[in-house]
Amino acid sequence: MGRQGAILEDNAARVAEMRACLAEVLPGVPVVFFENAMEMISWLEQHLGEVVLISLDHDLPFLDGSGRPIDCGDGRMVADFLAATPPTCPVIVHSSNNNCAPGMFFALEESGWPVTRVVPYEDHTWVRGAWLPHLQQLKRSEWLIP
């Protein structure tokens, strides 16, 4: 498999907007989206060397589509996994959880990962208004290499 992106996000509207932004900045680069932290970690164990961008939300669903409780973990689990590995690509922490997102950011930063943070606002408006400029800056800085 070639170069690809990996994103932890459970909101369908945000995923759709992220896909549109990624098509502008990284045309032709496939992106794998995850709603479950453990599934993302398992995938990253096999594919981290192919990943050009990681973006992590913190809060994930506690219920499946039928209302049954499930444990999808959280973005901190993925951040801790990454912090225990050598940095390979940029990471964007995109979470409005002001109690937990800073811990994700600092764990990655202290481990040498090139990390930035985006604070979501207005449903999914922030994806184009704040997340996209981070992608564009990463590409200009040559950290984001498709």
Image (spheres, rainbow, N blue to C red):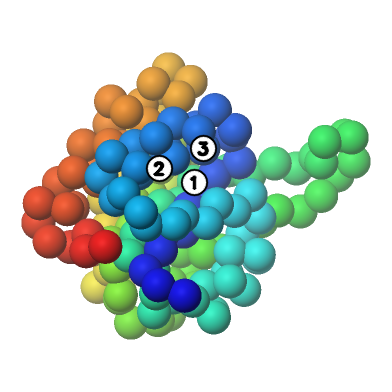
Distance between the Cα atoms at labels 2 and 1?
5 Å
- Find numbered disc 1 in the image and state the secondary structure of the residue it sits on: loop
Camera-nearest label, 3 or 1: 3
Q: Which residue is mark 1?
A: 57
Pointer 3 local density, CA inside 10 Å: few below 14, some 14–19, many at least 20: some
Q: Position of residue 101 (x, y in %)?
A: 42, 47
Query: Which quadrant holds residue 17?
Result: top left
Q: Which mark is residue 94?
A: 2
Q: Which residue does the numbered mark 3 point to in the structure image?
A: 15
> Which one is earlier in the sequence, the residue at label 2 or at label 3?
3
Residue 65 in the image, given as x and y percentages of width and height: 82, 36
Classify mark 2: helix, strand or loop: strand
Residue 73's place in the image compared with 65, above or below, is below
- Residue 129 image point, x, y percent: 28, 25
121 up-or-down from 93: above or below? above
Residue lying farthest left? 141
Disc 2 marks a residue whose amino acid type is His
Q: Residues within 10 Å of mark 1 (few under 14, many from 20)?
A: many
Residue plotted at (52% across, 73% down): 44
Q: Are marks 3 and 1 in contact (CB under 8 Å)?
A: no
Q: Are marks 2 and 1 in contact (CB under 8 Å)?
A: yes
Mark 2, residues whose alpha carbon is within 10 Å: few (<14), some, or many (≥20)? Answer: many
The amino acid sitting under disc 3 is Val
